[in-house]
Image: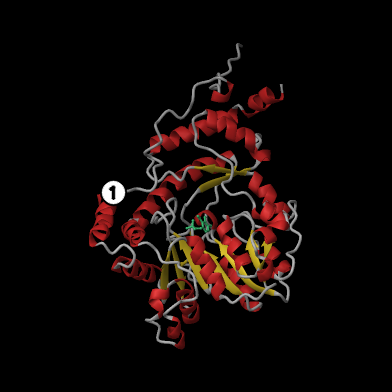
């Protein structure tokens, strides 16, 4: 009997044709700007009220309604809003703040400017947020607060984290910058902690260009952030803080009404645009999970959204190292990359003590920070090395997604050959 072997398609990295031939520019274009955005901005422009315009208050009303919170304060970006929220927590020099290392720097750097000491905790790999067990290990009598980041739009493990926070009387700040529209047990993210921020920067799910929405149910926090960064509103306060109307507390965090106009029209489309991403990524997940990838499917308690689509490569299942896989996928025409954020605890800001002097922070912190070591947080480091970033496909259709699936299939089928070609 003659045995025949079916020839496998040659992967592009070994000289074969690319799997992804469709033009993905439109499928991945973000933000989606239509005449509605243009008209909204034009209306503000024509009014000539380019600093103070009612559209900013209207945007805050939208967020209050969306999240069901008492206060929403529009800020010029998420970073300034995070600083304001943490400042309102009243950190004393040396107060410790539990936070993730796997996040964008703005989740953590404002802690330093409030005199606090970031204490980095491991990120767990089912929901991409703070690992409750490591958080619990790192709580000390000096711990004052916790920064919870709903990374990539995946809700963190809120039951355990909020239980710990209550038990130890910690303030909770939620960085919901990636998570517009996501819920945990039906409750919107951004409404669990003492205060939260949603970034409205261009890449985010409801973008303004630049902007950040600070939300809180706490009147004292709202009053503090108003005094800190919105001096023009201090006059409206019905509390003794009204006497600071002439100066505020010295910062200026006001959002541009042009940004607010964009943010309002974008927010109107949040649900429908989130749904498109979710539908596309549910499909891709369903195709990639059986190949051995973890696509971060949400647990039953969570309704997740997709700021980014990250997948985790388990080499023992796929038989190809992550770096090589990314290289091979790129050769196939996929927009694949390594994780977007470098781990914070490995950055010079934390590993070189001199930063504190360079940034003129010594007087705020008063005492030295702990020694941060680049090899701390071994689980987070290992998990980060397994991550691959793919586009969130905001407007893709099935044909493009199927070409991505084909690229993965081709590369995995030839994993041994690809690895051997590199070793040769
Ligand atoms: C997790 C996270 N937090 C905070 C920010 C800061 O927001 P902004 O860029 O609006 O200052 C960003 C993004 O840019 C972010 O990704």
Secondary structure at numbered mark 1: loop
Q: Residue furthest front?
A: 246
Please indicate whether residue 71 sits to the left or right of residue 99 in the image: left
Q: Is residue 365 visible?
A: yes
Residue in view at x 50 percent, y 36 percent: 335
Label 1 CB sits under 8 Å from any ligand 1 atom: no
Which quadrant of the figure has residue 76? bottom left
**From the viewer's perspective, is residue 2 above or below residue 163?**
above
Residue 122 place in picture, x, y as percent: 68, 58
Q: Single out the residue that lies furthest toward the bottom.
A: 240
Q: Nearer the viewer, residue 114 or 98?
A: 114
Residue 394's place in the image compared with 353, above or below, is above
Q: Which residue is at a point 46% across and 76% down the rendered structure image?
A: 248
Q: Residue at x 55, y 21 (%)?
A: 10
Residue at the spot 66% in from the left edge and 58% down from the top edge: 358
Where on the picture, by quarter, is residue 26? Answer: top left
Q: Count numbered badges in the picture.
A: 1
Q: Which residue is mark 1?
A: 34
Furthest toward the top, the residue is: 2
Tell me the quarter of the image containing the N terminus. top right
Nearer to us in this view, 30 or 423 = 30
Question: Which color scheme is applied?
Answer: secondary structure
- Whether residue 59 sits left or right of residue 136 in the image: it is left
Which image quarter is the C terminus in?
top right
Q: Who is closer to the viewer here, 357 or 11?
A: 357
Q: Is residue 127 visible?
A: no
Dot 1 crowding, Cα within 10 Å, few <14, some 14–19, many 20+ = few
Residue 387 screen position, x and y as percent? 60, 45
Residue 155, image x, y percentages: 53, 61
């Amino acid at each position: 009997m003659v045995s025949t072997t079916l020839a496998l398609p040659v992967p592009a990295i070994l000289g074969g044709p690319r799997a992804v031939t469709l033009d993905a520019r439109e499928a991945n274009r973000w933000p989606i700007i239509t005449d509605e955005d243009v008209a909204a901005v034009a209306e503000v422009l024509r009014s000539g009220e380019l600093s103070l315009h009612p559209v900013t208050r209207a945007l805050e009303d939208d967020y209050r309604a969306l999240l069901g919170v008492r206060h929403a304060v529009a800020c010029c970006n998420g970073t300034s809003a995070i600083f304001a929220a943490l400042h309102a927590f009243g950190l004393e020099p040396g107060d410790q703040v539990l936070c993730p290392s796997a996040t964008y720097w703005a989740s953590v750097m404002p802690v330093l400017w409030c005199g606090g000491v970031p204490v980095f905790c491991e990120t767990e790999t089912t929901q991409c947020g703070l690992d409750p067990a490591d958080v619990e290990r790192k709580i000390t009598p000096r711990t004052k607060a916790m920064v919870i980041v709903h990374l990539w739009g995946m809700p963190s493990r809120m039951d355990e984290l909020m239980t710990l926070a209550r038990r130890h009387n910690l303030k909770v700040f939620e960085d919901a910058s990636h998570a517009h529209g996501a819920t945990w047990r039906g409750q919107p993210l951004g409404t669990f902690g003492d205060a939260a921020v949603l970034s409205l920067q261009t890449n985010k799910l409801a973008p303004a260009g630049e902007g950040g929405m600070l939300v809180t149910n706490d009147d004292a926090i709202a009053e503090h952030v108003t005094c800190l960064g919105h001096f023009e509103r201090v006059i409206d306060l019905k509390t003794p803080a009204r006497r600071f109307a002439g100066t505020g507390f010295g910062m200026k965090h006001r959002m541009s009404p042009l940004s607010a106009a964009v943010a309002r029209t974008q927010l109107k489309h949040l649900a429908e645009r989130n749904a498109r991403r979710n539908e596309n990524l549910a499909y891709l997940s369903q195709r990639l999970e059986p190949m051995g990838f973890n696509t971060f499917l949400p647990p039953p308690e969570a309704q997740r959204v997709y700021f980014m689509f990250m997948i985790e490569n388990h080499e023992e299942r796929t038989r190809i190292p992550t770096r090589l896989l990314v290289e091979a996928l790129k050769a196939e025409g996929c927009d694949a990359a390594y994780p977007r954020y470098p781990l914070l605890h490995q950055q010079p800001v934390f590993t070189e003590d001199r930063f504190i002097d360079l940034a003129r922070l010594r007087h705020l912190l008063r005492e030295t920070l702990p020694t941060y070591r680049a090899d701390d947080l071994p689980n987070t480091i290992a998990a980060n090395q397994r991550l691959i970033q793919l586009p969130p496909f905001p407007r893709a259709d099935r044909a493009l997604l199927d070409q991505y699936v084909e690229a993965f299939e081709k590369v995995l089928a030839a994993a041994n050959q690809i690895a051997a070609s590199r070793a040769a």
